[in-house]
Image (spheres, rainbow, N blue to C red):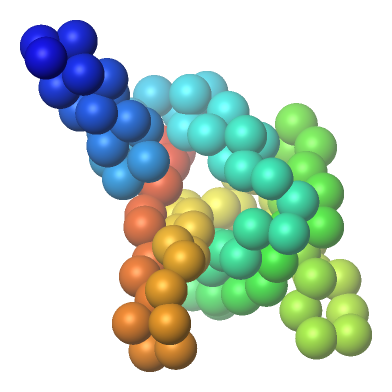
Amino acid sequence: MHRTACVLLLLFCLLAGPITAANADWAAVEGLPAGERIQVDLSTGKTLKGTIDHLTAETVYLRSKDKTLNANRQDVTRVYRQKPGKGALKHWVRLRLSPA
């Protein structure tokens, strides 16, 4: 029973909780699968939304409609991933990124 509760708590923290160290933050972003719908907030104030096409150690590439968008790691301030849901009930989960 205690082990099950610990596993569930760990899963909850991994899926919904913020990550605080810069390298761990980007590792969390790199761990998102291709096709995952995300929102990327940039230091310029611009927001990108789309599905992950692919990632590198320094850049995330998104597909949005018929074009590819990219964001460099040093410009990314926040990343949200969309949790499964129906229509307007979809939730966005923030992955916290520390300044690089």
Residue 86 pos. (x, y %): 43, 82
Identify the residue at the far top of this view. Answer: 3
**In this rendering, is residue 76 above or below 3?**
below
Task: Count all numbered tags in the image, as a single digit.
Answer: 0
Identify the residue at the far left of this view. Answer: 2
Quadrant assignment, res 92: bottom left
Along the viewing direction, whichever of 68 and 5 lies nearer the viewer: 5
Residue 93 pos. (x, y %): 36, 57
Residue 52 pos. (x, y %): 73, 58
**In this rendering, is residue 8 above or below 87?**
above
Quadrant into which the N terminus falls: top left
Left or right: residue 42 compared with residue 1: right
Residue at 39% across, 24% down: 21
Residue at 64% across, 58% down: 36
Left or right: residue 33 compared with residue 78: right
Identify the residue at the far front of this view. Answer: 1
Quadrant assignment, res 8: top left
Left or right: residue 40 compared with residue 69: left
Residue at 56% across, 53% down: 76
Along the viewing direction, whichever of 5 and 18 lies nearer the viewer: 5
Query: In this rendering, does residue 29 appear at all?
Result: yes
Along the viewing direction, whichever of 3 and 75 lies nearer the viewer: 3
Residue 25 pos. (x, y %): 47, 33
Along the viewing direction, whichever of 54 and 20 lies nearer the viewer: 54
